[in-house]
Amino acid sequence: MNAGTVTERPAVAVGGGGGRRWRVALAVIVVVAIAAAALAVAGVLTGTTAPGAGGAGAFKTATAMVTRRTLVSQTQVSATLADAGSYSVVNQASGTLTRLPAVGNMVRQGQALYQVDGQPVALLYGHVPAWRALSAGMTGADVRELNTTLVRLGYARAAALGPRAGWDYFGAGTAYALERFQAHLGITSPTGSLALGQAVFLPSAVKITAWATAVAPGVAATAGAALMTATSDFPVVTIALDTSQQAEIRTGDTVSVTLPSGTITPGVVTSVGTVATTNATTGATTITVLVALKHPARARHLSSAPVTVSIVTGTVRNALVVPVTALLAQPAKGQAGVGYAVEVAGGAGGHHLVPVSVGMIDNATGLAQVTSSRLTVGQRVVVPAL
């Protein structure tokens, strides 16, 4: 397709990186065409466009400067923001449940997740679940998790535990740090060893979403029984992206996420799916794209919400640009379709039309890339007055 022709089909950015596609928004073109028709009817090219001009059909106009800048084309897609990760917390302690936090509470590393017989069960970070008691002389991945946690919480010094390669060993440094942590947590008799059921290992801080049926203070705690469900406190945006747009996004790309409040916050694409699924009802074929927010605290009050994601699909640097509203539709010479021009204000020849070829349109800024040997930076073009 000719780079200077704007149609309803996707155009190719002349300066786009990596061959990524961008789309000229049909809605923008329709608005431009309608505006151009209105300008023509009102007599914009017959000397009735000066601000404050009187007479039938007159309207107010202004001018905007022709400049050079970088343009970015974007496409907006619907997505869902929700807490990442879902966990089932299994109790390993025996006794009576004496304290259960309310649903919706956040629990972080080193804090009590619940209590059994008045003793806290701590949340510690790790991917290996608690499955045995830990004490001096033992080794394993669960011991490494415990040592790492004690260092992060400040109860152990990394130097005291020795080289990281040896952190899977429960030594005297581990016992000393664990006893300090137990005392701070409020355990009645700190021992320096970790009894089974005294801690729960999960990958991150959690938000309690529901307690299991019949779980309540005063009920017997059954070892090995699921006690609650929880999610991480880290929000993630999930996009069901049409496969036709798959080439427009890559892992590591920066995107903009518009929250329900209207707040726009940056995000980074962390995963682009490779397996497509087809909706049985709509027939749409999509892949799953995940986005992490750069400032997750801005959305931590949202457990699940619809959001809009703006994906950059093309970039043109040092483009000659004018406002989209400066474009005037006119019949294309020698071919079917519509061409475009801008009305240049002032100069030796007074107001006059300059045909232009239209390239990328940046919907976010309302600017359009134009090409013309008769248009230069610093000239002013006519636009509708606000």
Image (cartoon, grey):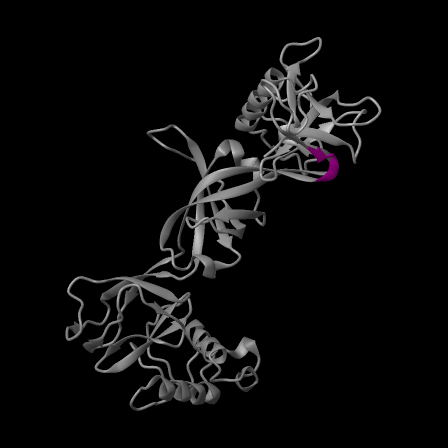
Above or below, 139 relative to 56: below
Residue 278 position in % (x across, y down): 39, 32
Q: Quadrant of the N terminus?
A: top right
Q: Judge by depth and name the residue closer to the eye, 143 or 235.
A: 235
Residue drawn at x 53%, y 79% as measured from the top left: 166
Q: Residue furthest top?
A: 334
The residue lying toward the viewer, choosing from 291 and 346, is 346
Q: Nearer the viewer, residue 318 or 132?
A: 318
Q: On the image, which quarter does residue 20 sit in?
A: top right
State which quarter of the image contains the C terminus: top right
Write down the region rendered in magenta.
63-69
Left or right, residue 136 beside residue 272? left
Tell me what residue is drawn at x 71 percent, y 31 percent.
14
For the question of whether residue 12 can be seen, the reply is no
- Residue 316, above or below 181: above
Number of callouts = 0
x, y percent for residue 65: 73, 36
Give the x, y percent position of residue 333: 71, 11
Main secondary-structure element of the magenta-colored stretch: strand
Quick check: 123 left or right of 252?
A: left
Residue farthest toward the front in the current orientation of the protein: 54
Q: Is residue 188 magenta?
A: no
Tell me the residue at 68%/36% (across/down): 16
Quarter holding residue 332: top right
Taking the image as shown, residue 350 lies to the left or right of residue 136, namely right
